[in-house]
Structures are given as C-alpha cells and as structure tokens.
Image (cartoon, rainbow, N blue to C red):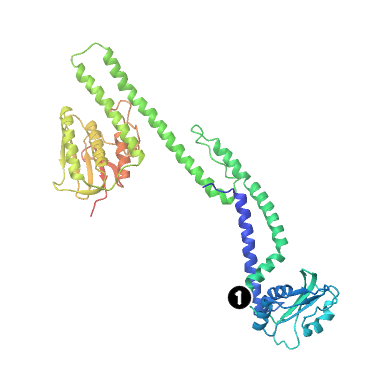
C-alpha cells in the first residue's frame, strides 16, 4: 500500500483536529449553558428552536389574493399537542404579524421587530426558568425573508444533532477559510521543514561501497529526526566495519592460498622426486585445510547455526581425539583424552562444538614439540581444556591470537584461522574461551559452555 506524502497527512490531521476541537468545545459550552454557567444560560428546550422554526415556516401558506398566513401542518399540530404551551409568530417585511400568529407573542414582539434585530432571545412574564425560552430571528422562506418567533418548544434527543449541524452551517465560512489556510500553512511548513532531510537524503544517495566511511550530517537535521539519522549512521558504521573485515578477510585468504598454490605449481613443473606423490598430497591437504577454515569462518559470520541441539561434549571430544590420533602419530606426537566416561550434556550445536575442539587440537599439535603429548580434558561442569607443552602464549598476545590470520611470525605454520573460528563459534554458543599457562611450560586453551542442569 502506497504511503501518503507528509504534507497531505498533516493537513488532514489539522482539519480533523479542528472539527474535533469544535465538537468538544460546542459540547462543553452547551453543557455549561444548560447548567446555568456562563454568560448565556440556556436550557435543553432551547436546542429545539431550529426544529420549531422549520415547522413554522413549513406551515406558511398564501391565500388566493396572495396574503400569507400560518396554517399549521399536521407535524406542527402534533408538536403542539406534545408541547401545549408552544407559541409561534411570524412577521412580514412590513413588521406586521401574519394571521395565525400567537397574540401574546405579537403583543410582546411587535415593538422589538420594528428595529429589525438579527436575532433576539426573550422570555415571557410567566416564565420561571433562569434561561429565556423564546427566540426570534429573520429567516429565508418561500415568501421572502420573514421574522420567525417561537416559544415553549420541547426538547427531543435528535435536537442535539440538529443544533450541532446548525452551528456547523453558521460556521461553514470559518471552517472553509480555516481549511484553506491550514492547507497552505501546513504545506509550506512541511515542505520547508523537510529541506534538511532532503539534504540528508542526497548525502545518503552518494554513499556506496567505496564511501561507507561517510556519515550523514546531523547539524542541520531537526531534533525529531536525529534518532533516525543517528541510527542510519550507526548502521553505516557497522556496515563499514563489516565490509572492511570482509575485504581484509578476502585479501588475507588470497595471500594464504597464494603460497601453497605456487608451491604446488612449482612442484608439478619440477622433475618428479621419489616422494613426489606424498609431497603432492601434503600440498593438497594444506590447501584443502585453508579452504575448510575459510568456509567455517564464513558460516560462523552468517549466524545460521542452530543452537538447540542436545550435545554430549565428552563424546564429541573422544571422537575428535580418535580422529586426530593418526595425525599425531605421523608427526611424532601423542594425544590423550582425560575426562569422564559418562555423558556431559550442553545445549548447542554438535558440529560447532566439534569444530572448536578440532581447531584447538590442531593448534596444540602444531605447538607441541616432537615426542610430546597433547591432552584433552573434559570437566564435569562442561569445560574443555586442550593442553600442549610448547612455547606457550605471551601475556600480550592472549587477546590478539583470536584475531583472523594472526600468527606470531611469518614463518609460523598454519593460516591463522583456527583460533579465530573457535572464538567465533564459542561466542555463538554463549560460552567463553581463553588461554592460560600449562604448568611446566606450554599453553592450555580453555572453553566453558553452559551446562544443562
């Protein structure tokens, strides 16, 4: 559904607000008048004046010689039966009472009508009400403009609607003028008030992937729009950070893959050595390992991991130890599992947990001196410890080691992705990962996951 522009909506709201204010004001002032409060006290019967005048006008007839008189209609007669004290008088343009007019009203109002009043409220001597019940005003009829006077009319519930409609009709010129002025004023105000937002919109249209560092100007924005523009700037900042991270990721990935691919190409071009097939498999494994690490990092960034699986951390750790055993033996190292034989359950994602353990084992085997032993310990409280006896991790490096592609030196093995992926996955699993010293030398990577009670 297409949204309306702001200016027409503001104009519409203003007109509705004016009508609502008029209705509320009319209702309150009428109620105060009925209660005798205010300059012009009134009564409920006064709301029937318009209906009584219409009945009087409908009763006007002309004789054969053109003389106008009051001949009550059936409606008027029925109304008089309901309100037996109701009186009607009509005066012509010569200020003479028409035949059929009530003599009491004629005697009282003849001197008044001589001055041609626009309208007059009056009371008869016998009236005991605090408010005048009579009313006379010039009105247009089929016989020209005549003064119509009524007195003693009785209220009916729909006289409220009639009185409200009459006042609306009287104030029609005001409402028309107010609507025109409101439209013009609101249109001018909105159009000029939105100029700063148009400037900001122009700035936003110029932002692309190469200018994500730009921010929308807040100085010219109205106070009401500052939260929106501020939120857009924060979104641009997050996009800028994410884009720079992706670009760094892509550049580093290309750099990491370039070397093993070049080595593989050179090996294919060089004369075949006796261990050519073994070296070729090792190069392919290295490239495959980097690709898998990159894919794992990309999937972690997508935040699509289901985290509601019931996972036995002990069983997953034993599986990862079994898978890494042959690799450890081939490289002249040992690996052992230390932990309960029973299950240790957590709520999370089995693939993610196994990826974390596998990456930590791979990192530990690289750090472990040849002939050494790597241990994987699972605690009863769902903690994971991967222990090596290598060079350890300096205090200053214990935060940066979890950054993508971080390596202590260019000569270090690996792509620098394993710990970053482990950190990313543990965070998504609502756990914590950190590194501590291994007694006697080395590093112990610890993971704490929420255990199911």
Classify mark 1: helix, strand or loop.
loop
Question: Which residue is drawn at the image coordinates 71% and 64% (left, top)?
Answer: 171
Residue 345 visible:
yes
Compare residues 340 and 193 and report the one nearer the observer.
193
Residue 259 lies, in percent from the top left, at: 32, 22
Q: Residue extending furthest top?
A: 271
Q: Mark 1: few, some, or many residues within 10 Å (few <14, many ≥20)?
A: few
Question: Which residue is drawn at the image coordinates 34% and 22% (left, top)?
Answer: 258
Compare residues 394 and 83 and report the one nearer the observer.
83
Q: In the rendered view, would you say 421 is above or below 137?
A: above
Residue 313 lies, in percent from the top left, at: 21, 45
Residue 245 lies, in percent from the top left, at: 41, 35
Locate residue 253: give its quadrant: top left
> In this image, 346 relative to 127: left or right?
left
Q: Can you say which quadrant of the picture contains the C terminus?
A: bottom left
> In this image, 323 relative to 102: left or right?
left
Locate residue 199: give its quadrant: top right
Residue 397 lies, in percent from the top left, at: 33, 37
Residue 36 visible:
no
Disc 1 target residue: 157
Q: In the rendered view, would you say 448 is above or below 393?
A: below
Q: Residue extending furthest front?
A: 64
């Amino acid at each position: 559904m297409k949204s309306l522009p702001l200016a027409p909506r503001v104009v519409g709201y203003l007109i509705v607000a004016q009508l609502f204010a008029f209705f509320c004001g009319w209702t309150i002032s009428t109620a105060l008048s009925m209660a005798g409060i205010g300059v012009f006290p009134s009564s409920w019967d006064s709301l029937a004046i318009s209906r009584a005048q219409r009945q009087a006008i409908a009763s006007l007839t002309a004789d054969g010689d053109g003389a106008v008189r009051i001949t009550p209609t059936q409606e008027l007669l029925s109304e008089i039966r309901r309100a037996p004290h109701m009186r009607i008088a009509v005066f012509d343009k010569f200020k003479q009472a028409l035949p059929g007019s009530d003599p009491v009203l004629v005697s009282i109002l003849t001197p008044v009508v001589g001055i041609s009043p626009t309208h007059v409220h009056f009371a008869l001597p016998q009236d005991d009400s605090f408010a005048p019940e009579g009313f006379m005003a010039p009105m247009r009829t089929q016989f020209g403009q005549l003064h119509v006077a009524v007195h003693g009319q009785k209220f009916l519930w729909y006289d409220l609607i009639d009185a409200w409609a009459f006042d609306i009709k009287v104030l029609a010129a005001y409402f028309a003028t107010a609507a025109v002025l409101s439209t013009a004023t609101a249109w001018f105000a909105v159009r000029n008030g939105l100029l700063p937002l148009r400037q900001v919109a122009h700035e936003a249209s110029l932002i692309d992937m190469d200018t994500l560092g730009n921010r929308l100007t807040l100085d010219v924005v109205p106070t009401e729009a500052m939260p929106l523009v501020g939120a857009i700037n924060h979104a641009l900042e997050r996009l800028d950070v994410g884009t720079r991270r992706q670009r760094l990721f892509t550049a580093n990935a290309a750099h990491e893959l370039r070397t093993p691919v070049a080595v593989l190409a050179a090996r294919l071009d060089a004369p075949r050595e006796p261990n050519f097939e073994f070296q070729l498999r090792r190069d392919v494994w290295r490239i495959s390992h980097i690709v898998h690490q990159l894919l794992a990092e990309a999937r972690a960034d997508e935040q699509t991991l289901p985290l509601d699986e019931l996972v036995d951390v002990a069983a997953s750790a034993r599986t990862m130890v079994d898978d890494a055993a042959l690799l450890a033996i081939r490289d002249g190292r040992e690996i052992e599992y230390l932990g309960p034989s029973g299950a240790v359950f957590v709520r999370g994602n089995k693939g993610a947990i196994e990826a974390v353990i596998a990456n930590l084992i791979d990192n530990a085997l690289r750090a472990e001196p040849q002939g050494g032993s790597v241990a994987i310990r699972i605690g009863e409280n769902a903690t994971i410890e991967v222990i090596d006896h290598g060079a350890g991790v300096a205090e200053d490096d214990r935060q940066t080691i979890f950054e993508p592609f971080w390596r202590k030196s260019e000569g270090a093995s690996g792509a620098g992705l394993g710990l970053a992926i482990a950190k990313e996955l543990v965070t998504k699993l609502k756990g914590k990962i950190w590194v501590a010293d291994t007694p006697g030398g080395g590093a112990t990577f610890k993971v704490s996951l929420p255990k199911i009670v």
